[in-house]
């Protein structure tokens, strides 16, 4: 009992300390949109969780400074520390979901494990979950997963894109027959997500696939990399997070596995993943959901309106890093969903149900991207009732010892491969949970 009380007290203290927007408090004004923020600024995943949280916070605060929020509705955010733990994530969600004049408009769980848990709760609470580039791959099917939005790509899409790049390097999928591909993955729902897609590709194209789990948090991997040294796969895919990524790259160097044969998912390709390895990280590659750097219009606004006023959530020199930009993009998508919802329901705080309508009718055009300062940073996105993912594409980036550089053009995920898998998995989930799929042809 004492442990539970201490943890509850700690959660409350962390949440109270992390109130970031002006006007935040127990009683929000009637014209403020409340956005709960599930983050992890502590523990083994903090090196990756912190820049993401900073980018998201800075974007929302910049909107308040530049535009007065969204159509005159100010944005209020409150962080709650999850430590990447599923139980704490659910506690944070439950504590924050009812705040504000309309409750939580939208939630970004920032964890596949937390997403799995909240997938059961969100329909009853009528709160949409934005899981950009993560979460359940089958939640692309909006007819079954009406409240999950894996915008811009799922892990099945990521695995397909990476293997498309491998095939291109080898001269086509036909050249992969007889080769060996290993997946080093975080032994959690997150790490297990790409396995069905990779098994299907191996069956279709004749390469040998092996999956090697790494126990949380990923600091002990010597046995895994001794196995890789023995088997000598042609490529290693890395599905890690936090300290697991830098540890994997160091261990690869220790067993002399070539880093230019290692390709990480987009959560294994940020500065904290490669800088600890020094020169041993050179040549390592990873998928990239968006552009790198601080040269975009949105960054100029953030420097001027947030950092020049000493209101930045993090260090100025970290603006524009990979995960900082990932947080920016997430903040942008959430705010655009709210903006779209307001176009139908009026310029006021939106409920979760109204924001879901905004997400299912989201159409972010090139013109809107340019107007918002994201030109060159992201690509257009269109969502529907049936398709909660939209276009799924990525580029491959490579670390040269000091910076990331793109080594591929945009690669589209193969929807002809992925969509039937999604339909089958979503159907199975619906049967297990006794869900009647929505008829999206009748949704407006």
Image (cartoon, grey):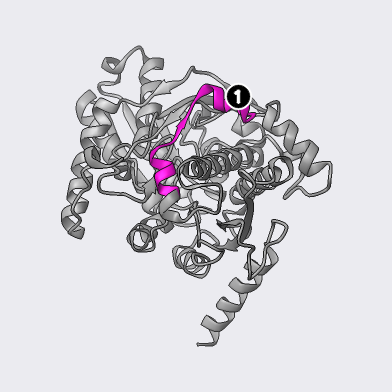
Q: Which residues are magenta?
A: 355-375
Q: Position of residue 269 (x, y in %)?
A: 55, 36
Q: Secondary structure at mark 1?
A: helix
As for residue 142 lying within the magenta part, the answer is: no
Q: According to the image, label 1 marks what residue?
A: 370
Q: Quadrant of residue 421?
A: top left
Which quadrant is the C terminus positioned in? Answer: top left
Outermost residue, top direction?
A: 171
192 versus 38 height, above or below: above
Q: Is residue 430 left or right of residue 313?
A: left
Q: Is residue 75 left or right of residue 188?
A: right
Taking depth in this image into account, of 159 and 31 the one nearest to the observer is 31
Taking depth in this image into account, of 138 and 366 the one nearest to the observer is 366
Q: Quadrant of residue 358?
A: top left
Q: Position of residue 202 (x, y in %)?
A: 25, 30
Specify few, some or many for label 1: CA neighbours under 10 Å numbering under 14, 14-19, or 20 or more. some
Taking depth in this image into account, of 189 and 8 the one nearest to the observer is 8
């Amino acid at each position: 009992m004492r442990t539970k009380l201490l943890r509850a007290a700690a959660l409350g203290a962390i949440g109270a300390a992390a109130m970031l927007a002006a006007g935040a408090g127990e009683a929000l004004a009637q014209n403020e949109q409340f956005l709960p923020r599930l983050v992890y600024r502590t523990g083994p995943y903090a090196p990756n969780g912190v820049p993401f949280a900073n980018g998201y916070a800075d974007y929302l605060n910049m909107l308040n400074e530049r535009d007065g929020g969204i159509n005159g509705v100010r944005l209020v955010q409150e962080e709650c520390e999850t430590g990447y733990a599923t139980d704490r994530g659910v506690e944070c969600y439950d504590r924050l979901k009812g705040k504000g004049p309309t409750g939580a408009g939208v939630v970004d769980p920032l964890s596949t494990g937390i997403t799995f848990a909240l997938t059961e709760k969100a329909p009853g609470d009528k709160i949409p979950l934005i899981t950009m580039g993560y979460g359940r791959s089958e939640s692309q099917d909006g007819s079954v997963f009406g409240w999950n939005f894996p915008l811009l790509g799922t892990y099945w899409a990521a695995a397909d894109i990476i293997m498309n790049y491998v095939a291109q390097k080898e001269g086509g999928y036909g050249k992969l027959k007889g080769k060996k591909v290993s997946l080093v993955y975080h032994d959690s729902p997150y790490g297990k997500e790409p396995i069905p897609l990779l098994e299907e590709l191996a069956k279709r194209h004749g390469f040998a696939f092996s999956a090697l789990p790494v126990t949380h948090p990923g600091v002990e991997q010597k046995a895994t990399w001794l196995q890789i040294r023995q088997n000598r796969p042609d490529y290693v895919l890395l599905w890690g997070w936090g300290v697991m990524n830098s540890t994997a790259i160091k261990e690869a160097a220790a067993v002399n596995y070539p880093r230019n044969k290692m390709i990480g998912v987009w959560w294994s390709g940020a500065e904290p993943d490669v800088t600890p390895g020094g020169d041993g990280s050179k040549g390592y590659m990873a998928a990239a959901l968006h552009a790198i750097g601080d040269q975009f219009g949105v960054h100029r606004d953030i420097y001027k309106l947030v950092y020049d006023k000493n209101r930045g959530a993090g260090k100025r020199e970290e603006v524009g890093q990979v995960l900082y930009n990932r947080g920016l993009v997430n903040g942008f998508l959430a705010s655009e969903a709210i903006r779209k919802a307001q176009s139908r329901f009026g310029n006021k705080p939106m409920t979760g149900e109204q924001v879901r309508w905004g997400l299912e009718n989201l159409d972010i055009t090139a013109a809107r991207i340019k107007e918002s300062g994201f030109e060159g940073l992201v690509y257009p996105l269109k969502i529907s009732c049936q398709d909660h993912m939209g276009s799924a594409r990525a580029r491959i980036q490579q670390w040269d010892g000091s910076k990331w550089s793109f080594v591929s053009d945009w690669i589209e995920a193969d929807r002809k491969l992925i969509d039937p898998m999604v339909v089958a998995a979503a159907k199975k989930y619906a049967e297990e949970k006794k869900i009647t799929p929505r008829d999206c042809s009748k949704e407006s």
